[in-house]
Amino acid sequence: MVIVTGNRPDMSEGQTPDWDINDAVVPRVVNFDAFGEWCDGHVRRVYPPACEEARRHASGWAMRNTNNHNVHILKKSCLGVLVCSARCRLPDGSRIHLRPAICDKARKKQQGKPCPNRGCNGGRLEVLPCRGHCGYPVTHFWRHTEHAIFFQAKGAHDHPRPEAKGASEVRRSLGAGRRVRGLALLLAREAAMADKMLTTNADKPNVNNAHPQPPPLIPDNQRVQLTCTCGPFECSCRWRPELTADTYATGAWSPQNTQSYHAYAPSAPQDPPLQAQHYDPIALPGDEMYHPNEIFHLDQPIRLDFPAEEHTLESSLTFADLNSENSRPEEAYWLDWQRPTGGSESSETPSPELLGSGHQQAEAYCEQPYVPQAYYPEGAQYYPNEHTRTSPEMDEAQFYPTESRTSAPMNTQEQRFLRYGQEYSQTNVDMHTWNYSDCAFTSNDTTATSVNLHRQYFDVVDL
DNA sequence: TAATGCGGGTTCA
DNA sequence: TGAACCCGCATTA
């Protein structure tokens, strides 16, 4: 890594720079991290001022604003996840875990509503609160400086990931408009969005292109007008099986970049200027293509009528499964946890929840570790017993990528993991990341298709 | 209507 | 004093 300058005593060249969100002086960074939608654990990242997701303080987790009485640091705390009180299972054996509304009023309305799983008998939605930070919700901190956006997370989520933000928005649209109207609305939005995106990209070819783009899944000559259904921050079309590390090695701002630092003194709030980054041009969002077959693997698993809660049917792998830049090797581990009880009927390829859901981690940063309660005791789906898992230390050591304290760059083939001064290596090409925003707003052909599929398996409820 | 940000205020360790 | 949380308000989509 390249350290530009360092006024802090711990940032001399060759050493791992260090900072805390509350520091009076934070480093000046010239190389940035890739945006992480599902940051979990004690994480610090530095994003470029032009990173739209960072500017919006986006997160896959349902984070609500929390007043910390510090105008320079925005604090958010996790709301947890909306689950079924009956702990019902979807046909693939996974669980209901919806996104809680950020708005208190809306969230209260969500609670107590019937479980959207048609196979659920009498379940109601209830909030499973986040207690991942010493018994308190996981908190995210955002700090804007002239040269960067600093992000710090404290705590590890002790609950599944909520559904994608876009999914809840789509459902809300559908809930309001009901079936036919919702579809029509989506189709109309698609046309408007495609138009808007083309215009936007023509006008601003570079501003939001900080993330390298994946190549199209399908060669140009095989393309059809299909785009991803993902929301702006949960785009799961990042997965490309044929990706190689070299594919994204050309970007000047590599997602695996580490950071270089200047000392940075806080300045008056202002719109951060765009940095002179040498971003590679990207394909238009409309260039995100999927094979038609893949359309049917998007979003939630397909619901089939099933008589009993524990009765499970096969589900197919989805893009969400194959997931995000924050996909971690623990996901296989999660798969074990979340495999349906009696799992003989479960597919080899899990549903989005199975791979993409949250996870349980012991809070290794708390002086007084919080002891979570088993939420799904019968299946140990999210809260395994001690004997079913490795020690918290090992979990974290194995699964947590080294964050900004890492001095060496992470390449695409090898992620380095740091835990209590120990480093672990792990090969995982799926740790590629690329710009969600650029590929997320496309579409809605497949959104409509996916939504219709969704409807087959979920009751339309206003959540 | 909900997401988001801001800020006043309270409670508690 | 710091952290968590509640509440209301304003803005935006």
Image: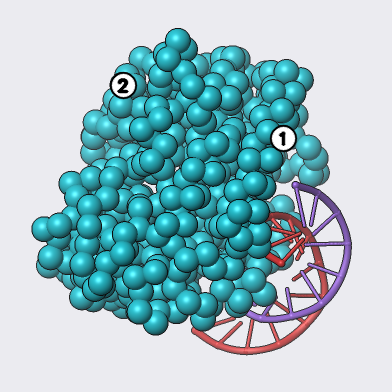
Chain colours: A cyan, B red, C purple
Residue topped by disc 2? A242
The image quadrant of residue A196 is top right
Q: Chain of mark 2?
A: A
The amino acid type, in three-letter code, at marker 1 is Ala
Q: Secondary structure at mark 2?
A: loop
In the displayed structure image, the side of residue A260 where residue A1 appears, left or right = left
Query: Is residue A461 in view from this perspective?
Result: yes
Identify the residue at horizontal 40%, vertical 74% (top origin). Answer: A84
Q: Tell me if mark 2 has few (under 14), some (14-19) or many (20+) residues whose alpha carbon lies within 10 angstroms of its own.
A: few
Q: In the rendered view, would you say A368 is above or below A7?
A: below
Q: Earlier in the sequence, mark 2 or mark 1?
A: 1
Identify the residue at horizontal 58%, vertical 34% (top origin). Answer: A443
In the displayed structure image, the side of residue A120 where residue A286 appears, left or right = right
Front residue of B5/A238: it is A238
Query: Could you say where residue A408 lies in the image, as x and y percent from the top left?
Result: 37, 27
Q: Tell me if mark 1 has few (under 14), some (14-19) or many (20+) residues whose alpha carbon lies within 10 angstroms of its own.
A: few
Q: Chain of mark 1?
A: A
In the displayed structure image, the side of residue A324 where residue A414 appears, left or right = left
Front residue of A328/A219: it is A219
Front residue of A206/A447: it is A447
Identify the residue at horizontal 44%, vertical 73% (top origin). Answer: A115
In the rendered image, the quadrant that contains the N terminus of chain A is top left
The amino acid type, in three-letter code, at marker 2 is Glu
Q: Nearer the viewer, mark 2 or mark 1?
A: 1
CA separation in Å, label 2 and label 1? 32 Å
Residue topped by disc 1? A192
Query: Could you say where residue C10 lies in the image, as x and y percent from the top left?
Result: 88, 62
Query: Could you say where residue A199 lies in the image, as x and y percent from the top left?
Result: 74, 23
Front residue of A134/A434: it is A434
